[in-house]
Image (cartoon, rainbow, N blue to C red):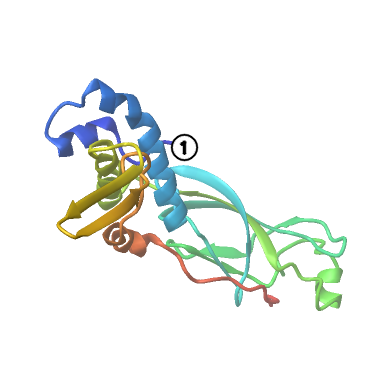
Amino acid sequence: MANLATKTDLAARLGRDLTCEEDARLDALLADASALVRSYTGQNFGPATSTVTLRSQAGMILLPQRPVTRVTSVIAIGINGAPNVGLVDWWWDGLDKIRLGAGTFVINLPEVWWDDDDGYPGTFAVTYSHGAEVPPDVVMVVCGMVLRTVTAPTAVGGITSETIGPYSYRLESAGIGTMVSLSEAERKTLDRYRRTTGMISVRVG
């Protein structure tokens, strides 16, 4: 999966060329920052095609990756020995939801779907395309995480102590230059990309 920012993005924000020492660490730090942003938001960003298994809620399937650009297929996952069945009576709302029909357009629909309250499938395999150009604010966050790390005054942990008259303190540091991290401000910037609603399984039709 591609990184969410590039060396060119970093150099533009740094205002100078990268040193050899900085450049040697950038690939790993960009990968780490991109992974952390994807983990926090639940979004991959960038164009891709995925097949995911999702539960329906009130006859609706909510697609997790955005923006959705195309829905290719919806397959009902059979349970209690019933086979998987490709559906044709579904509609994509053009955004991020699929509305399911009652299954009446499916030829030779397994009888268990109608006779058993627990027979109608609650899970569906959806193949869809999603993602676009990485949003500018996501690039900004990734660059900030990497630059804060690569330009830190120290890349190693240790003990810092100081004495002023009768007072002294001792501080153990993990070394802020060793790994990327998300600040509270960066989390707030990314919060709009997070999806916090859950899905439950219900009978359709």
Q: Position of residue 19 (x, y in %)?
A: 21, 24
182 left or right, relative to 65: left
Image quarter in which the C terminus is found: bottom right
What residue is rendered at 27% in x and 37% in y? 154
Q: In this orientation, does residue 163 appear?
A: yes
- Left or right of 36? Residue 53 is right
* Residue placed under numbered mark 1 in the picture: 1
Choose between 118 and 106: the one closer to the eye: 118
**Residue placed at 22% from the left, 38% from the top?**
153
Q: Is residue 151 above or below residue 58?
A: above
For residue 157, side relative to residue 39 (left or right): left
Instruction: Report x, y in % for residue 127.
Output: 58, 50
Task: Decide which of 85, 17 is in the foreground and name it.
Answer: 17
Q: Position of residue 155 (x, y in %)?
A: 32, 36
Q: Is residue 175 visible?
A: no
Q: In this rendering, is residue 33 above or below 185?
A: above
Residue furthest top in the image? 20
Along the viewing direction, whichever of 111 and 202 lies nearer the viewer: 202
The residue type indicated by label 1 comes to Met
27 left or right, relative to 84: left
Q: Residues within 10 Å of mark 1 (few under 14, many from 20)?
A: few
User: Residue at horizontal 77%, vertical 56%?
Assistant: 84
> Which residue is painted at 36% across and 39% down in the image?
178
Nearest the camera: 18 or 63?
Answer: 18
> Residue 65: horizontal and vertical position, in percent?
47, 55
Identify the element where label 1 is drawn. loop
